[in-house]
Amino acid sequence: MHDFSDQDIQQIYNHGLTPKIIDQQLKNFINGFPYSNISSAATIGNGVLPMLSHDYAEYFDANRHNYNIVKFVPASGAATRMFKDLFEYLSTKEMNKTTQLVIDNLPNFAFYNDLMAILPQNATTYDIIEHIVTERGLGYGNRPKALIQFHKYPDFNRTSLEEHLVEGALYSESRGNVNIHFTVSPEHRSGFEELLSKVLAEYESKFNVKYHITMSAQKPETDTIAVNLDNTPFRNPDGTLLFRPAGHGTLIENLNDIDADMIFIKNIDNICPDCGRNDTVLHKKLLAGMAIKTQQDIFNYIRAIDSGTANLSDVHKFITNTLGIRNIGISNISKMRDILNRPLRICGIIKNTGEPGGGPFWVRDENGIETLQIVEPGQIAPDNISILKNGEFFSPTDIVCMTRDINGNAFNLPEYIDPNAGFISEKSKDGRKLRAMERPGLWNGAMANWNTIFVETPLTTFTPVKVITDLLNPGHIQH
């Protein structure tokens, strides 16, 4: 075990961690994480279902009021990366493509009027950019994406948070209630509360619903220690250890705290204006209808196993063909029951258009069992990159989760994580290089032992905003 000082140990405990946990993290830095053993890309007919028939949406609408539904929106962190090129322009005073595009299209942004109201007369290009991203003006560079005006309408504008309120009313309402949970950084929470206090009544009246908004922060005990390039603990100038948030995979703890029968997951920046919303709402309902139907099938098979009336061949076929788990023995009934008795997720995936991120693959474990997983490029061994290139689909984080068992009890979601699905990345602090550890991602390693179904959805359901100029794309223009 690493030789920590008394002050180090106290700091570790104050962070909600233990020296034993930190010692394991240090070993992970030294040993690294194994690559995913991908056997093939998941494709239509080989692990991916084609777009669903509208019957599933009707099935969801007919049954939704029997379920407590929550829309879960990861919304932590500031929009620093969204404005990276604008910050670079302010730093170097050299024009770049993104900054020029912003200047050329300024009136097309939803925040244009707010910006004009605070700009000095005869503002230079530098003044304009400074007033968009810094605290001299709108301060967007330090705001979370949720609080940035995304979409321009004839008589009003909407932030991405407000667009999620609209979406929630259209597909996650149950018995007149719309439950939405945002993960929020503590320093941004007051901004969320301030905006919600201004707009909630308006949207409740517009959609005749009652919103129940909750928020949580990433838990400090999910942070990981940072190390130097030689894998010794990285220390701040005052000698204290540095702990870092360990990626979105830590949000499995927040998801685990949600009291719901069904949970929709969608990122804060993947949102569209009213004119493009029909496809999104329809396909969310289709995924949810399939989630209800599949869960009912699972429960029926479990009841049959428990009563001794199960046809083992039928159970095996369901696990193989519907839940995408191959090479399990047909004779092991308790193993099949264990597989059925897991959290379920239905994942919408889209045709790969070159977006960075994970996609659906068949992954083989040490026992030769193959399962369907979302795999990030960093989890794939260099000699398997050819399989990565065969991937036709991309995962846009469009997931419907069923997190209760046959008795109505919530699954303990951390039990279904693959702890080996983390990865190491190189970062820096105060100009010093460091190595950082990310826990298994929320939709890959953190859900590795869930039952997973992949369904193709149209490209129109994916309109992310990674950089500011994405707001100029057709999917973000209200017409």
Image (cartoon, rainbow, N blue to C red):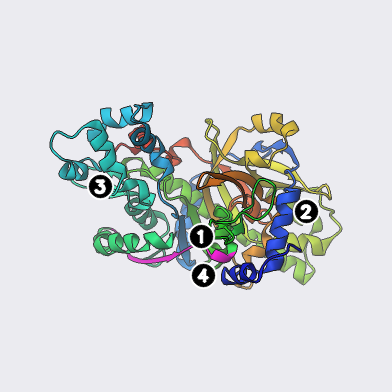
Q: How far is the residue under mark 2 from the one under mark 4?
A: 31 Å
211 displayed left or right of 154? right
**427 falls in the magenta region:** no
Q: How far is the residue under mark 3 from the one under mark 4?
A: 41 Å
How crowded is the residue under tag 2: few (<14 C-alpha within 10 Å), some, or many (20+)?
many
Q: Earlier in the sequence, mark 2 or mark 3?
A: 3
Q: How far is the residue under mark 2 from the one under mark 1?
A: 27 Å
In-front residue for pair 121/228: 228
What stretch of residues is rendered in magenta?
207-221
Q: Earlier in the sequence, mark 2 or mark 1?
A: 1
How crowded is the residue under tag 3: few (<14 C-alpha within 10 Å), some, or many (20+)?
few
Q: Earlier in the sequence, mark 3 or mark 1?
A: 3
How crowded is the residue under tag 4: few (<14 C-alpha within 10 Å), some, or many (20+)?
some
In-front residue for pair 78/134: 134
Seen at 54% across and 62% down, the residue is 255
Q: Which residue is mark 1?
A: 263
Q: How far is the residue under mark 3 from the one under mark 1?
A: 39 Å
**Tag 2 near tag 4, CB within 8 Å:** no
